[in-house]
Amino acid sequence: MPDPAVPPTPPVPLASLLAREDLALRQIAGPSDPGIVIHWVHTSEMADPYPYLLGGELLLTAGVHVPEGADPGGYFDDYVARIVAAGGAAVGFGVAPVFDTVPPALVTACEAQGLPLLEVPPRTTFSGVARAVWQLMAQARLAELRRVTEAQQRLAAAASRPDPVPSVLRQLAQRVSGWAVLYGPDGAEIASGGRPAGTDLAAALAELADVVRPSGPGAPTSATDSKAGTHLAAYALGAGQGFALGVAAPQRDPGDHTIASVAAVLLTLLTGEHQSGTGAARSSALVRLLLGAPPAGVAPLLGPGRWLVLHARPDAQSPDAVAASALGAALGSPLVDLAQDVVRVLVPADREPAAQPGWTLGVSAAVAPDEWPAADTQAARALARARATRTSLVRHGDRAGLADLVPPEEAEAHARLLLAPVTATPALAETLRTWLSLHGSWDRTAVALSVHRNTVRQRIARCAALLGTDLDDPDVRMELWFALRQR
């Protein structure tokens, strides 16, 4: 039997549907297992509904498809067998207008093949059954969201306790009614919460944690398994130091993965570099910056080498603190700044940033600490270009080019003179830069700057007038681009 292509809503227990007094549904055949669930409703009068089922449906029919003169036993045996083969969850047979009662042969076939059969009375419409299922799904979804939200709040509160790691593990174990354990880089159990699992389950969970422990491209970040009726899950902690979270629970409820993922993010922060001597050094660097020390003076506390500035925006909603922390953990840096709609991350240049699912990233060139402000501007422009071109990650170009053939002082003086008419209005200069970088595309420039395309046209026309030049001339564009790169 194929697994149903599960929709992004919780399934509805068949028992909950039968409990609806307004529907007056009655189960007359098949198992009454409380674990039977419905993922969706489908109405069909096809003699063979198999090609149209995805699995997990309550199939509603009034028997219009039953041919006259057919052998009821043989016909319904084949009909039910095809529904079972497609993974259908149950059948609802509407009494009237074709049949006055549910055909006994259908009852026999469903009972023999273990398919729940519901009698739908004449006063209950199929659309009413479907509406009831969607209502139950909406209620279940709301309950799940409330459960996840409450779990997030309790986990965050646990992380602020004096013993944060054991507190988070205990809270996680309580939320999933199971056992949660933190494994160290060597596979040893560091801390746990909840009722300990048996020896065999503990060994199976430790083996699953070994699957996610390797870091690097292509390594899985989570893994699941089951043993002796217990659901097992393991999550790699994003600090890249080999820590892993293991969870064993008697059942896998909707929302459990989200709750465990939140715990993994919190444990990543609690076990990351900021808990080590390096973290103390970074705290010291932050204090010195706040007290007025120059970046170059505090950079040695953060570690040797050059740095990348990364700007990121989520593809869906605005970023929050948890999402920003998770992004920093995935990139291997706790130096994260959550702005209004952009997350900024400072990453050592030896940690090559990769595209992150659900995020659009702009990355600066590798720079020394005294060039951090310029790199911040580079990352912002790279992010704007990434959004305009719908690319998951764009890097600022740091290759040597023609600009290196001109002495910097002469290049800057030429740029100041050439761009003087537009630099007094920063919006014009930035629009011209973005428009040129996107090959004169009005739509992409509008997306990158978050303005209307007509605004872009007006600004570019204003630039052309102030500069007294033809912006359709490729030589003019090249010279302006050269000048803009010197700013």
Image: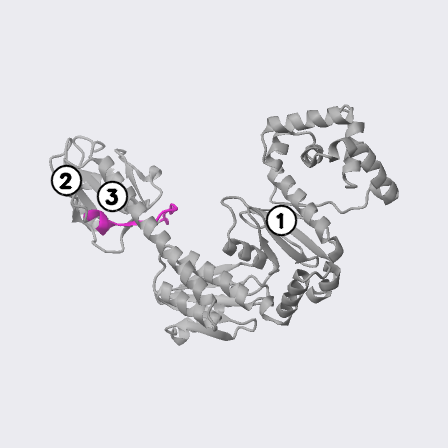
- Label 1 crowd bin: few (<14), some (14–19), many (20+), radius 10 Å: many
The amino acid pointed to by label 3 is Val
Q: CA distance from mark 1 to mark 3?
A: 56 Å
Q: Which of 169 and 15 lies nearest the eye of the viewer? A: 169
Residue at 26%, 39% in the rendered image: 131
Q: Which residue is mark 1?
A: 311
Residue 102's disc is 2
Q: Is residue 442 visible?
A: yes
Q: Horizontally, is 75 left or right of 267 in the view? A: left
Q: Residue at point 87% right, 44% down?
A: 409
Per the image, label 1 sits on a secondary structure element best described as strand
Say what amino acid the circle numbered 1 marks. Answer: His
Q: Which residues are magenta?
A: 2-18
Sequence-first tag of 2 and 1: 2
1 or 3: tag closer to the N-terminus: 3
Q: Residue at x 19, y 48 (%)?
A: 18
Q: Residue 53, image x and y in percent?
A: 33, 40
- Secondary structure under tag 2 reads loop
- Res. 301 image quadrant: bottom right
Point out which mark residue 80 bears.
Answer: 3
Q: Is residue 412 left or right of residue 355?
A: right
Give yes or no for residue 17 being in the magenta stretch.
yes
Q: Position of residue 277 (x, y in %)?
A: 63, 72
Q: Nearer the viewer, residue 135 or 208?
A: 135
* 262 in relation to 14, above or below: below
Q: Is residue 221 above or below residue 97?
A: below
Answer whether residue 48 is magenta in the image.
no
Foreground disc of the pair 3, 2? 2
